[in-house]
């Protein structure tokens, strides 16, 4: 609760709409997020959780609405289509960790982290007319940062390994480090443990939990209710493209108001009891 | 006699290798351009490219060689472009079309997630293609490309249809001139040697790219 009042608003989503063909997947979704908050988005499959995340990352261009990050309007349907260059810069406000990791198989762990950062550094260097020396310094900084991040996710010893040599949990931890290296304002996770064997989800969830701080703002689409309850400072429940409930974990989990959320919880409990 | 025949056949073999190399040099990059055409979002470009590939793949290479060689003279009344250039043009276009389909299959087999990962990391479309996708595509298309390139070695013999003296024609000439039959078997050894070298080469490339999966 404390974080909410302290933090400055990092993300504002206003009336976001998206349809595929004629099916409305997001129906006027609005919410705000403060710095340092962890938002968990829950809901049944097909409810629009992933679409919302992909709209934020501009992997899907929304039909209507506005997305504002730190006072920078990154999407506004009134402004029309962005060119690719602007789109790229705006995407960098967000980091995204995918369900399927999507590491680059031909690069080792270290180069998976540094590839994009180095390309960006090179581009900026060229744009600013910097020297080769300066670029080398930038590269050294990136390498140092990559090493630090790998240490943070506990994979420093796997630096030279290729993704195919890692377990799913390790691959996902590399993917998290890769998303962090570009210093996004908001780090998004799209069901980060859904593709993992049950015994591997713990290590990934621990890393995500470890990232929680006053500086890191995160959005996590997840089916791990326990995790959402423990780690999130805000919960959004989406059903049929509408935010049915939004609130603190206590409010949402202990005092669900909408019928849809109540039935969602009872189904989740069924699943849990069936599994155990 | 054996030495004399061998030397004469080596002359033919040189032309075979020449056609082979020039075709590769032209068709490998041209194929990529055709691929981009057949994957284009602009419908007109896509349909024209697809129709072109259909025509080229749907008619015999031998017919194409004849058309390129005689066509300009018959239709325009011009002098034409010469035997060897006609062969090379026909080969390059024909193989570029086959290569383009292999490339397309390779590119389409790469998961959308690889593109998306590049996008969320702020990479440009060009960077994503050349830094992420291409290497994975190359790894995947090596086996079918090996197939196609070995077929090319043997297809070079079609050049004789417009009297280019490549290996097969050279042997045939000897057979006709000297009334001996064995050179026609002997050239089999040349082809086997050539394709053998290529097989080993492709094996090595595959092994070299074996350090990762995916």
Image (tube, rainbow, N blue to C red):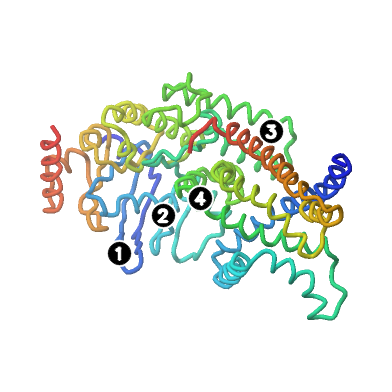
**Disc nearer the start of the sequence (3/1):** 1
Which residue is identified by label 3?
A135
**Disc nearer the start of the sequence (2/4):** 2
**Disc nearer the start of the sequence (1/4):** 1
Q: In the rendered structure, are the residues bearing label 1 and label 2 in contact, judged by CB atoms less than 8 Å apart?
A: no
| Residue A24 numbered mark, or none | 1
Q: CA distance from mark 1 to mark 2?
A: 18 Å
Examine the rendered structure and indicate whether residue B96 appears above or below residue A130.
below
**Disc nearer the start of the sequence (3/2):** 2
For label 2, count other residues whose C-alpha is less than 10 Å away and answer few (under 14), some (14-19) or many (20+).
many
**Disc nearer the start of the sequence (1/2):** 1
| Same-subunit check for callouts 3 and 2 | yes
Examine the rendered structure and indicate whether residue B30 appears above or below residue A41.
below
| Same-subunit check for callouts 1 and 2 | yes
Q: Position of residue A224 (x, y in %)?
A: 24, 37
Q: Position of residue A3 (x, y in %)?
A: 31, 35
Judged from the image, the secondary structure of the residue bearing numbered disc 3 is helix
For label 4, count other residues whose C-alpha is less than 10 Å away and answer few (under 14), some (14-19) or many (20+).
many
| Residue A67 numbered mark, or none | 2
| Same-subunit check for callouts 3 and 1 | yes
Which residue is identified by label 4?
A90
Query: Which chain does tag 4 point to?
Result: A
Query: Which chain does tag 2 point to?
Result: A
Examine the rendered structure and indicate whether residue A65 appears above or below residue A107.
below
Q: Give the left or right position of residue A214, taking residue B183 as reference.
A: left
| Same-subunit check for callouts 1 and 4 | yes
Q: In the rendered structure, are the residues bearing label 3 and label 1 in contact, judged by CB atoms less than 8 Å apart?
A: no
The residue at 39%/47% (across/down) is: A11
Q: CA distance from mark 3 to mark 1?
A: 47 Å
Query: Which chain does tag 3 point to?
Result: A
| Residue A167 numbered mark, or none | none
Query: Which chain does tag 1 point to?
Result: A
């Amino acid at each position: 609760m404390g974080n909410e009042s302290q933090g400055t608003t990092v993300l504002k989503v206003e009336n976001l709409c998206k349809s595929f063909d004629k099916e409305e997947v997001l129906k006027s979704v609005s919410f705000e997020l403060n710095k340092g908050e962890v938002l968990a988005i829950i809901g049944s499959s097909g409810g629009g959780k992933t679409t919302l995340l992909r709209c934020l990352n501009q992997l899907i261009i929304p039909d209507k609405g506005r997305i504002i990050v730190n006072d920078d309007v990154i999407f506004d349907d009134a402004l029309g289509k962005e060119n690719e260059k602007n789109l790229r810069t705006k995407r960098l406000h967000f980091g995204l960790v995918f369900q399927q990791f999507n590491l680059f198989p031909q690069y080792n762990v270290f180069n998976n982290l540094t590839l994009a950062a180095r390309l960006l550094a090179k581009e900026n260097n060229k744009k600013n007319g910097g020297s080769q020396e300066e670029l080398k310094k930038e590269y050294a900084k990136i390498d140092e940062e990559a090493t630090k991040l790998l240490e943070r996710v506990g994979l420093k010893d796997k630096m030279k390994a290729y993704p195919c040599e890692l377990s799913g949990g390790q691959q996902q931890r590399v993917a998290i480090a890769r998303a962090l290296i570009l210093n996004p304002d908001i780090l998004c996770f799209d069901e980060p443990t859904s593709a993992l064997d049950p015994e591997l989800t713990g290590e990934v969830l621990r890393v995500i939990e470890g990232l929680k701080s006053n500086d890191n703002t995160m959005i996590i689409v997840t089916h791990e209710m326990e995790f959402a309850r423990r780690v999130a400072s805000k919960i959004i429940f989406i059903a049929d493209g509408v935010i049915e409930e939004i609130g603190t974990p206590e409010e949402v989990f202990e005092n669900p108001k909408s019928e849809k959320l109540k039935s969602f919880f009872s189904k989740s409990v069924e699943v849990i009891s069936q599994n155990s | 006699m054996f030495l004399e025949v061998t030397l004469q056949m080596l002359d033919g073999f040189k032309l075979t290798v020449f056609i082979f190399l020039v075709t590769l040099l032209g068709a490998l990059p041209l194929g990529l351009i055709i691929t981009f055409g057949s994957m284009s979002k602009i419908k007109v470009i896509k349909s024209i490219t697809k129709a072109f590939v259909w025509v080229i793949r749907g008619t015999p290479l031998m017919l194409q060689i004849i058309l390129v060689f005689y066509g300009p003279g018959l239709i325009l009344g011009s002098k034409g472009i010469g035997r060897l250039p006609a062969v090379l043009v026909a080969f390059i276009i024909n193989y570029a079309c086959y290569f383009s389909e292999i490339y397309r299959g390779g590119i389409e087999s790469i998961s959308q997630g690889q593109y998306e990962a590049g996008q969320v990391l702020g990479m440009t479309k060009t960077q994503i293609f050349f830094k992420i996708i291409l290497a994975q595509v190359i790894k995947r298309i090596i086996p079918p490309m090996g197939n196609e390139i070995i077929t090319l070695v043997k297809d070079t013999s079609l050049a004789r249809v417009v009297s280019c003296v490549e290996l097969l024609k050279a042997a045939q000439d000897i057979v006709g001139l000297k009334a001996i039959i064995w050179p026609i078997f002997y050239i089999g050894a040349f082809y086997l040697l050539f394709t053998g070298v290529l097989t080993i080469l492709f094996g090595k490339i595959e092994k070299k790219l074996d350090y990762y999966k995916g």
